[in-house]
Image (cartoon, helix red, strand yellow):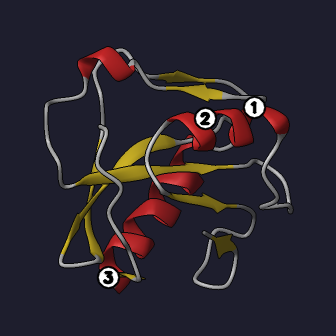
Amino acid sequence: MSAKRRTWGIEGDVLDMVNEASRESFPNEFVAALRAEEGVITEILLFPGSYSNKHSAHMQLYMMPIDLSVVGTVHSHPGPSNRPSDEDLHLFSNYGNTHIITCLPYDRSSWQA
């Protein structure tokens, strides 16, 4: 994805889905891509071959479809911090312009973009 698109919101049911998937993946991390329409995140995309553990989550980016509506990534941390790690920052600098991290307790107040 080379085009940078502005994103200014996320649908509540999408955020709830991210948090539910994060709870289901716990204690491992959850990872997905974000799709937006008119600046609002409307969907998450799961990629075949993605994997995670207690310390990281990886998407097989070569599996991503050519889709200009994909604006970034979302993943969970299995602890109480949603601060990005050095590895997160590296991904963020190379892929997309919108990135969300959610953390325990995986609710509407536990995420940041």
- Mark 1 or 3: in front is 1
Q: Residue at x 73, y 49 (%)?
A: 77
Q: Amino acid at mark 1?
A: Glu
**Res 91 label:** 2
Q: Is residue 43 left or right of residue 106?
A: left
Question: Can you tell which quarter of the image residue 94 is in?
Answer: top right
Q: Residue at x 37, y 45 (%)?
A: 33
Answer whether residue 27 is visible to the viewer in this image. Answer: no
Which residue is labeled 1 in the image? 87
Q: Amino acid at mark 3?
A: Glu
Considering depth in this image, is 79 or 33 the residue closer to the camera? 33
Identify the element where label 2 is drawn: helix
Mark 2 and mark 1: Cα distance apart in space: 6 Å
Identify the element where label 3 is drawn: loop
Q: Is residue 74 above or below residue 91?
A: below
Q: Is residue 27 above or below residue 53?
A: below
